[in-house]
Image: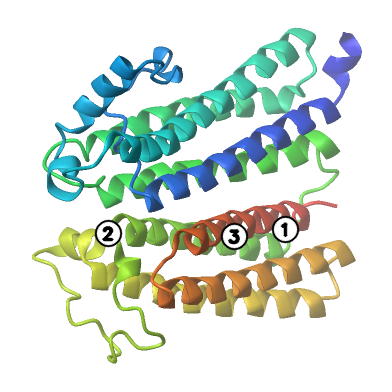
Amino acid sequence: MTSFLRSDRSRPVAIWLFAVAALVLAMVVVGGATRLTDSGLSITQWKPVTGAVPPLSQADWQAEFGRYRQIPQYRLTNAGMSLDQFKSIYWWEWAHRLLGRLVGVAFAAPLVFFLIRQQIPRRLIWRCGLLLLLGGLQGLVGWWMVASGLAGRVSVAPERLAVHLGLAFALLGALVWTALDAWTGQARQILPSPWGRRALGLIGLIYLQILLGALVAGNDAGLVYNDWPLMNGALFPRDYAGPGFWATVAHSQGAVQLHHRLLAYGLTLAAVAMGVGAWRSRYLAEDSKLLAMAVSGAVIVQALLGIATLMAGTPIWLGILHQLTAAVVLTLAVIFAWRVRRV
C-alpha cells in the first residue's frame, strides 16, 4: 500500500471521477427535461431514502396524486388532470431524483474504497471531500428549490433554479478538473502565462451565462420575444423594468432574456478572439490550440442553438439540446484552462 501513498496519480480514481461527471451530465439533461415538461413539482415531499421507491399500487398513486392536487400548480394550471397525465410528469421528477441518489452513491462508495486502499493522491483527498459536500449541498438546494413552488406559486422561484443549476455545473467542472489531475499527476510546473488567466476568465463568463439562462428558464422567458435579433420588433423589450431591482433582474421576462442575449454576444466574441489568439500564439502547444478552437466552435454552436430554440418557441428537444451543449461548452473550457496552466 505504501506505493499508493507515494503515487501522485491514479488512473482508477480518474476514471471514477470521469464516470461521476458523466452521471452529473445526465442529471443536468434529465433536470432540463423535468423543467421543460413542468414536472418538477409533481413530488411534493422530500424523502431522501424511502422516496427512491415509486408508488407500487393504485392506492399509492392516488395518495401521491392527492398531495399534488393540494398545491397551486394543480389548482391554477393543471386542474382536471387525469391520473395518467399525472404519472407522465411524476416519472420525470422521480427519474431526476433517482439520478441524484445514484450520483451520491456512485461518488461516496468508491470514495470510501479508494481511501481505504490509499489510492487517492494525498493532494486530492481534501478536494474529493469538498466534492462530496458539494454534492450533498446540491440535494438540499434541490429541495429548497422545489419547496418554493409548493405554496403561493405555480412554479419554482427562478433564482433558486439558478442556484440549483449553478451548483450542478460547478460540480461538473470540479469533477472534470480533479479527474484530469488524478489522471496525469501533479504538474511539473504551473505556467505564469496570461493564457491561464484568460481561460479562467472565459470560464467565468460561461458560468455567468449559464446562470442567466437558468433565470430565463425559471421565468419561461423563452416563450416571449421569439424574434431575433430584435425583441418584438424593438431593440429593447417594452416590459423590461419590474417594480424593483430584484424584480427586474430576476423576475422580468424581458430583462432576463435581454441580459442572456447581451452576454451571449459578448461571450461569443470573447471565445472567438481567444481561439484566434491561441491559434496564432507561439507559446501554446498544439493540443492547447486545438482545445481553444474547440471551445470557440462550441460557443458558436451554442449561440446558434440558443437563437434557434428561442425562435422555435422553446420546444422540449431543442431546450434539452441547448442545456446539454452548455455543459459541453463548460467542460471544454475547463479542460482548456487546465491544460494551458501545465507543462
**Label 3 crowd bin: few (<14), some (14–19), many (20+), radius 10 Å:** many
Residue of label 2: 219
Q: How is the image coloured?
A: rainbow
Residue 116 locus on image (x, y percent): 73, 7
Q: Which residue is at a point 42% across and 29% down the rendered structure image?
A: 139
Q: Amino acid type of disc 3?
A: Thr
Q: CA distance from mark 3 to mark 2?
A: 21 Å
Residue of label 3: 325
Q: Which residue is at a point 31% across and 37% down the rendered structure image?
A: 86
Q: Is 86 placed above or below 159 here?
A: above
Q: Is 223 placed above or below 214 here?
A: below
Q: Which residue is at a point 71% across and 34% down the rendered structure image?
A: 19
Residue of label 1: 336
Residue 288 locus on image (x, y percent): 81, 63
**Helix, strand or loop at disc 3?**
helix
Residue 227 relative to residue 74: left or right: right
Res 246 quadrant in image: bottom left
Q: Is 313 placed above or below 250 here?
A: below
The one nearer the camera, 74 or 339, is 74
Residue 200 locus on image (x, y percent): 60, 58
Spot the residue most to the left: 243
Q: Amino acid type of disc 2?
A: Asn
Residue 126 relative to residue 120: left or right: left
**Helix, strand or loop at disc 1?**
helix
- Asked if residue 44 shows in the view, the reply is yes
Q: Amino acid type of disc 1?
A: Phe
Residue 176 relative to residue 94: left or right: right
Q: Is 324 placed above or below 4 here?
A: below
